[in-house]
């Protein structure tokens, strides 16, 4: 599970094993690296300002780092008893080694800690890798938002997915993770 990023190796297994040290709250000083990765992986990226606004709004925002660089990040929010995953991204050379799945699990754990009973997200129908990740993690399609995302030719729909994190039908039951 070693990938090369920018001439340096990314030891994903070590990052996963030392998650508590690798994952920390996103801060203003992370935003230039977050913005650079965002622009690298998306045709229609969030702006640096979107991330800064998320921090100012108190959203649950986290980064994953090794000693040298940013490897991934996520932003979510909780409203009442429901969390909403707004952004989750892994730098391209670190993709495919389990960091995205671990970061998604982290978001779920944080949502439960913030008393969310479920987690919602949107995903582009064209993003087969992300859809597969979410489906394997137990997310189910619950709707479609027409014309949600900007696209090269107009707009692209968003598949709305949901995962139940706390099950009311079974006292104390926690799903996923």
Image (cartoon, helix red, strand yellow):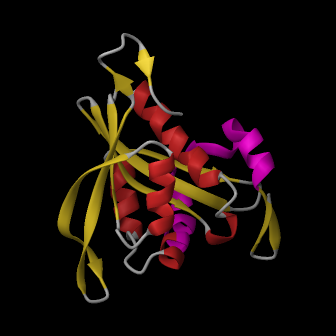
Is residue 27 found inside the magenta-colored segment of the image? yes
Q: Is residue 32 left or right of residue 66?
A: left
Is residue 146 found inside the magenta-colored segment of the image? no
Residue extending farthest top: 171
Q: Residue at x 51, y 65 (%)?
A: 129
Residue extending farthest bottom: 153
| Residue 51, position as x, y percentages in the image | 40, 60
Q: How many marks?
A: 0
Q: Is residue 148 left or right of residue 2?
A: left
Based on the displayed image, in which of its 4 quarters is residue 158 positioned? bottom left
- Quadrant of the rendering where the N terminus is positioned: bottom right
Asked if 48 appears above or below 154 in the picture, the reply is above
Highlighted range, magenta: 12-37
Q: Is residue 99 left or right of residue 171?
A: right
Q: Residue at x 44, y 22 (%)?
A: 174
- Quadrant of the rendering where the C terminus is positioned: top right
Q: Residue at x 37, y 77 (%)?
A: 44
| Residue 98, position as x, y percentages in the image | 66, 52
Q: Residue at x 74, y 48 (%)?
A: 15
Based on the displayed image, in which of its 4 quarters is residue 82 positioned? top left
Q: Magenta: predominant secondary structure element?
A: helix
């Amino acid at each position: 599970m070693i990938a090369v990023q920018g001439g340096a190796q990314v030891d994903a297994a070590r990052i996963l094993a030392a998650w508590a040290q690798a994952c920390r709250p996103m801060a203003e000083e992370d935003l230039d690296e977050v913005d650079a990765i965002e622009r690298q992986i998306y045709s229609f990226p969030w702006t640096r300002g979107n991330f800064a606004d998320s921090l100012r709004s108190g959203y649950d925002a986290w980064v994953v780092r090794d000693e040298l660089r940013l490897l991934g990040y996520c932003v979510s929010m909780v409203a009442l008893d429901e969390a909403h995953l707004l952004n989750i991204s892994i730098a391209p050379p670190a993709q495919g080694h389990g960091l995205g799945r671990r970061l998604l699990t982290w978001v779920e754990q944080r949502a439960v800690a913030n008393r969310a009973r479920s987690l919602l997200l949107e995903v582009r129908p064209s993003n087969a890798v992300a859809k597969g990740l979410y489906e394997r993690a137990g997310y189910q399609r619950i709707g479609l938002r027409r014309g949600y995302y900007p696209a090269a030719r107009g707009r692209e729909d968003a598949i709305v997915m949901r995962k139940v994190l706390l099950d009311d039908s079974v006292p104390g039951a926690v799903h996923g993770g």
